[in-house]
C-alpha cells in the first residue's frame, strides 16, 4: 500500500508572492494536527498545515499504515491509513491548505503580535497563532549499530513496515522487545496473507515492554514450533554475492551463532529530535514542550502544543488525548484571533445552526 494514495483529495499550496496571512499555522499533519484543523474550523479560524513528510498522516502512516488501531472513540478498529482518510474527509469543509515535504526553519514574533514563519522551501507566513502538533518531533528510528550493515537498509534491513506483502514467504528476523516488534512478529508468524516462511524474534533479554497478551501469543507460537525466540544481540553479519545472508548473534552465554535470513526488521523505537523547535525559546522538558492544561499554550503566548510533543502532569501519549487537547487549544486561540468577541461560548454540532452552516450541512428539524 502506498500511504500517499489517500482517498480524500487535499488542498496543496500554490505559488504565493508575499507572506501568507492566516489565523493559524499547524506544524504536523498527523492525526492530532488534522483534528486541530477541525476544531479551529468550528470556531471559524483558517489554518495552513506544514509537514516534513510528503503526505499527511504522520506517525500512523509512516510507521504502521496497515496495523489496527483499537482506541479511537466510536471506531472499534481502523488502520492508520483509514484513520487519516477519515480525518481528511472530516476537515474538508474548512479548506485547510497543506504545505508538505518541508519543515519550519524560522519563527519570529512580530511587533503586531503575529508570528513570521518560514519553511525550508522558502514558504512564508504571517500567522496570529501557531499549533505545534509534531508528534515526537522529527522522529527517526533508532538504528542497529553494526558497522557495514547500513548498506542493506531499504533492501534487506528495515526499520519500519510500509508494505507487509513484500515480506510474505521470506525468512525474517525481527529485532526488538516493544509493541511494534511483537505486533509484526505475530503478523508474519501467524496464518494470513502476510505469513512469512519463517520468523525469528531476537531480543537482548527474556523480558518485554509489550502488551502481555502479545507476549503470551508469541510464546505459544514458539511452543508450537511456528516461530523461534532467541535472547541475544547482533554483533556482525555475513554476505554472499552482495546480499545479506546471515547475522552473527551473540547470546547471554557469550557464544556467537550464525543465523541465516532473508530480511532483518529492527524495531528499537523512535529517537525524538525537536530540530529547530528546540531553538524557538519555548520551555522544554525532556525534549517535550511544557504546556498548561487550560488551553495547552506553551511558554510563548500564541504558540500552542498538542499531542505527543507536549508534556504536563498526568500526560498520556494517546491519539484520543491529543484530540481533547485540540479542542481546548482552539478555544485558547480564538481569544487571540477574535479579541473583539470576548468570551467564546461552547456550541454543539448536534444543535447549533451556526456550526451547521460552518460545516456545510443542513440543520435538522425536530418535532
Image (spheres, helix red, strand yellow):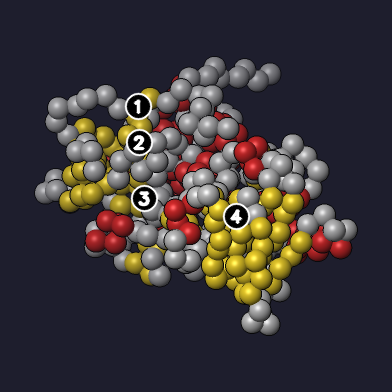
Q: Quadrant of residue 177?
A: bottom right
User: What's the mark number on residue 132?
Assistant: 3
The residue carrying mark 2 is: 100
Q: Is residue 90 left or right of residue 195?
A: left
Please state which of residues 363 and 203 is positioned toward the viewer in this rendering: 203
Q: Residues within 10 Å of mark 4 (few under 14, many from 20)?
A: some
Q: In percent of the image, x 61 and y 59: which residue is there?
A: 246
In primary-sequence order, the first of circles 2 and 4 is 2
In primary-sequence order, the first of circles 3 and 1 is 1
Q: What x and y, as percent, mark residue 86?
A: 56, 31
Q: What x and y, as percent, mark residue 307?
A: 47, 53
Q: Is residue 227 left or right of residue 316?
A: right
Q: Residues within 10 Å of mark 1 (few under 14, many from 20)?
A: few
- The CA distance from mark 4 to mark 1 is 44 Å
Residue with the most extreme front position: 241
Q: What x and y, as percent, mark residue 214?
A: 75, 58
Q: In percent of the image, x 60 and y 67: which residue is there?
A: 248
- The CA distance from mark 2 to mark 1 is 8 Å
- The CA distance from mark 2 to mark 4 is 38 Å
- The CA distance from mark 3 to mark 1 is 19 Å
Q: In percent of the image, x 45 and y 56: which residue is there?
A: 150
Residue with the most extreme left position: 111
> Element type at marker 1?
strand
Assess whether mark 2 and mark 3 are in contact (beta carbons under 8 angstroms).
no
Assess whether mark 1 and mark 3 are in contact (beta carbons under 8 angstroms).
no
> Element type at marker 4?
strand
Disc number lying in front (2 or 4): 4
Which image quarter holds the N terminus?
Answer: top right
In primary-sequence order, the first of circles 3 and 4 is 3
Q: In percent of the image, x 14 and y 31: which residue is there?
A: 18
- The CA distance from mark 3 to mark 4 is 44 Å
The residue carrying mark 1 is: 12
Amino acid at each position: 500500500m502506498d500511504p500517499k494514495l489517500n482517498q480524500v483529495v487535499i488542498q496543496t499550496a500554490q505559488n504565493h508572492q508575499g507572506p501568507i496571512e492566516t489565523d493559524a499555522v499547524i506544524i504536523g499533519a498527523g492525526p492530532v494536527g488534522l483534528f486541530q484543523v477541525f476544531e479551529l474550523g468550528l470556531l471559524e479560524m483558517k489554518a495552513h498545515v506544514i509537514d516534513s513528510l510528503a503526505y499527511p498522516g504522520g506517525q500512523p502512516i509512516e510507521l504502521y499504515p496497515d496495523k489496527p488501531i483499537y482506541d479511537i472513540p466510536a471506531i472499534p478498529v481502523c488502520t492508520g491509513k483509514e484513520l487519516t482518510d477519515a480525518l481528511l474527509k472530516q476537515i474538508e469543509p474548512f479548506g485547510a491548505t497543506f504545505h508538505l515535504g518541508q519543515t519550519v526553519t524560522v519563527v519570529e514574533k512580530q511587533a503586531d503580535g503575529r508570528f513570521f514563519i518560514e519553511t525550508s522551501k522558502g514558504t512564508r507566513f504571517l500567522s496570529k497563532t501557531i499549533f505545534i502538533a509534531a508528534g515526537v518531533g522529527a522522529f527517526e528510528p533508532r538504528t542497529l549499530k553494526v558497522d557495514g550493515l547500513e548498506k542493506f537498509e531499504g533492501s534487506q534491513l528495515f526499520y519500519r513496515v510500509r508494505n507487509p506483502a513484500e515480506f510474505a514467504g521470506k525468512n525474517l528476523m525481527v529485532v526488538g522487545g516493544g509493541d511494534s516488534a511483537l505486533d509484526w512478529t505475530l503478523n508474519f508468524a501467524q496464518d494470513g496473507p502476510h505469513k512469512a516462511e519463517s520468523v525469528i524474534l531476537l531480543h537482548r533479554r527474556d523480558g518485554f515492554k509489550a502488551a502481555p497478551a502479545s507476549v503470551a501469543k508469541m510464546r505459544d507460537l514458539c511452543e508450537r514450533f511456528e516461530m523461534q525466540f532467541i535472547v541475544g544481540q547482533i554483533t556482525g553479519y555475513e554476505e554472499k554475492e552482495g546480499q545479506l545472508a546471515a547475522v552473527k548473534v551473540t547470546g547471554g552465554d557469550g557464544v556467537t551463532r550464525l543465523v541465516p535470513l532473508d530480511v532483518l526488521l529492527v524495531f528499537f523505537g523512535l529517537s525524538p529530535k525537536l530540530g529547530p523547535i528546540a531553538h524557538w525559546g519555548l520551555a522544554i522538558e525532556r525534549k517535550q514542550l511544557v504546556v498548561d492544561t487550560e488551553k495547552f499554550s506553551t511558554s510563548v503566548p500564541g504558540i500552542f502544543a498538542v499531542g505527543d510533543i507536549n508534556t504536563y502532569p498526568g500526560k498520556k501519549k494517546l491519539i484520543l488525548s491529543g484530540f481533547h487537547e485540540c479542542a481546548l487549544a482552539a478555544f485558547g486561540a480564538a481569544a487571540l484571533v477574535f479579541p473583539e468577541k470576548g468570551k467564546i461560548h461552547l456550541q454543539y454540532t448536534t444543535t447549533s445552526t451556526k456550526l451547521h452552516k460552518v460545516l456545510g450541512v443542513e440543520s435538522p428539524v425536530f418535532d
